Image (cartoon, rainbow, N blue to C red):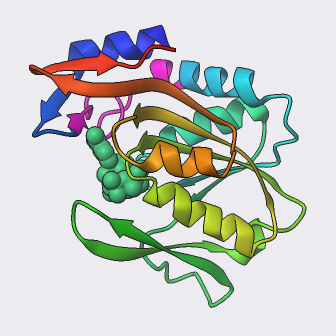
Amino acid sequence: MKELEERIQKDGRILGNDVLKVDSFLNHQVDPVLMQKMGQEFYNYFHNKPITKILTVESSGIAPAVMTGLEFKKPVIFARKHKSITMNNDTYIADVYSFTKKTTNKISIAKHFLNEEDHVLIIDDFLANGQAVSGLTSIIKQANATLEGIGIVIEKTFQKGRQLIDQQNIPILSLARIKAFKNGQVVFAEE
Ligand code: G4P
Ligand code: NA
Ligand code: NA
């Protein structure tokens, strides 16, 4: 997505060797106009699939997921990272390992919102090591629902998440694919 790549070039900051800071439009302040266009891109790519639910993880996945849900006119579920006081034991739970923090956290969603009749599109802001996507995939399996595809805003092709998804033959669309950070510049992968 050309407009997203241009925005990354303009406003993205590279931290260390492998992290892109994009908190002016995605991870802290959100640009709703850009977000809406992302939702349209995901819709154009996946609209032939019988999607019934959009699934993401709080917090940064919510904005692009909601815009996608708006296009599909389908509900958006975000997995919670912290236990809600209104959540009882009827929850699907999965582990998400963080390579950066070297800790394992749990994500959960209420069983009530996902079942075997659902056809799910996963949306997330970043694909790095693929741990968030793995956790969501596990929850979809627990619900006996069908995973139809994965939409990612920014993929870093040099980390292992993409390989993990390709091994399972799941349709995926990443709106921007970063191949490397070189001399303080973002290098995008060719289509
Ligand atoms: P993974 O899900 O692909 O395995 O990601 P990983 O464990 O490597 O990263 C953990 C967190 O860091 C995730 O957010 C993920 O979205 C984010 N992340 C990974 N690479 C980048 C990057 O280059 N830039 C930015 N800005 N974030 C990155 P999270 O902890 O779930 O936080 P949030 O959703 O509440 O923002
Ligand atoms: Na995320
Ligand atoms: Na994030």
Residue occupying the far bottom of the picture: 89
In the displayed structure image, the side of residue 44 where residue 124 appears, left or right: left
Q: Which residue is drawn at 45% across and 48% down?
A: 161
Name above or below for residue 147 compared with residue 166: below
Corner quadrant of residue 5: top left
Q: Position of residue 55 (x, y in %)?
A: 64, 53
Name above or below for residue 70 compared with residue 116: above
In the displayed structure image, the side of residue 65 where residue 126 appears, left or right: left
Q: Which residue is drawn at 49% across and 78% down?
A: 84
Name above or below for residue 48 compared with residue 75: above
- The region drawn magenta spans 19-35
Question: How many marks are shown on the rendered structure?
Answer: 0
Q: Position of residue 43 (x, y in %)?
A: 71, 26
Residue occupying the far front of the picture: 167
Q: Residue at x 58, y 41 (%)?
A: 65
Q: Which of 168 and 74 is in front in this view?
A: 168
Q: Where is residue 117 in the image (x, y as percent from the top left)?
A: 90, 61
Q: Based on the picture, tell me whether residue 62 belongs to the magenta stretch.
A: no
Residue 59 visible: no
In the displayed structure image, the side of residue 91 where residue 56 appears, left or right: left
Q: Nearer the viewer, residue 122 or 130?
A: 130
Residue 125 visible: yes
Q: Which residue is drawn at 22% across and 60% down?
A: 100
Q: Where is residue 167 in the image (x, y as percent from the top left)?
A: 61, 50
